[in-house]
Amino acid sequence: MRFVYLLRHAKSSWKTGALDHDRPLSGRGRRAAKVLSRHLREQRIEPELVLCSTARRARETLERIEPALGTPTVQIEREVYGASSDELLERLRGVPDDVGSVMLIGHNPGMQMLALALALPSAGARELEAKYPTAALATLAFPGASWNELEPGTAELVGFVRPRDLER
C-alpha cells in the first residue's frame, strides 16, 4: 500500500502587501501548523518524500511540521506552486517506485481537486468536497505497485483532518 498525504499550506497573511508567492504565514497559520505538527507526530505520519511548493507560506508550513516528519527527503519545487490537479497527478506519477509514501504541500484549488479525483466515493470525500481549508491534510491509500498506476478513483481517503478538528 502506498500513501499520499495532501497538505494545503497553513493560513497566510494578506497584511504585508507581498506578492502572492511571497506571503508569509499569519498568526493563525503558525498556530495551525503547530497543532498539525503534533497530530503528525502522534499519528506517526512520516512520509519518505516531501514535495513542497516554493511559495513562502508553503515553505513556512513545512518548516513548522518538518521536525514531526522523521527524516524524509525534501524537495522544494516551483512546479507545485499554482499547479492544477492534473499537473500534481503527473508529478506524483514521477515519484520513484522505491518510495512508499509522499507528502505534497501545495495550494488550492489544485490540492482539493486532486484529492477529489483520486478518492473513491465516500462520506469523507463528500466532506472534503465541501471545503478544503488551509492546513487541512487528506490521507489517501493507493494499492498500486507503481506510482505510475495512480489514476483518478484508485485511492481510498483514509483520513481528512482540519486544524479545528485537532484543537484541544
Image (tube, grey):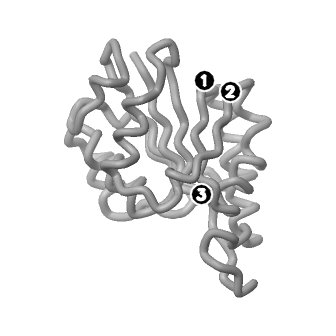
Residue nearer the viewer, 55 or 123: 55
- In terms of secondary structure, where does tag 2 sit? loop
Asked whether residue 162 is in view, the answer is no
Label 1 packing within 10 angstroms: few (<14), some (14-19), many (20+): some
- In terms of secondary structure, where does tag 1 sit? loop
15, above or below 121, in the image: below
Residue in view at x 42 percent, y 21 percent: 2
Q: Identity of the amino acid at label 1?
A: Glu
Residue in view at x 31 percent, y 18 percent: 143
| Residue 77 horizontal side relative to residue 1, left or right | right
Residue pointed to by mark 2: 72
- How far, Cα to Cα, is label 2 from label 3? 18 Å
Residue pointed to by mark 3: 9
Q: Position of residue 109 (x, y in %)?
A: 39, 63
| Residue 36 horizontal side relative to residue 133, left or right | right
- How far, Cα to Cα, is label 2 from label 1? 5 Å
- The earlier-in-sequence mark between 1 and 3 is 3
Label 3 packing within 10 angstroms: few (<14), some (14-19), many (20+): many
Residue in view at x 42 percent, y 29 percent: 94
Residue in view at x 69 percent, y 73 percent: 23
116, above or below 150, in the image: below
Q: Quadrant of the N terminus?
A: top left
Q: Identity of the amino acid at label 2?
A: Pro
Q: Are marks 2 and 1 in contact (CB under 8 Å)?
A: yes
- Circle number at residue 48: 1
Q: Identity of the amino acid at label 3?
A: His
- Circle number at residue 29: none
| Residue 88 horizontal side relative to residue 49, left or right | left
Q: Are marks 2 and 3 in contact (CB under 8 Å)?
A: no
Residue nearer the viewer, 59 or 7: 59
- The earlier-in-sequence mark between 2 and 3 is 3
Residue nearer the viewer, 51 or 130: 51
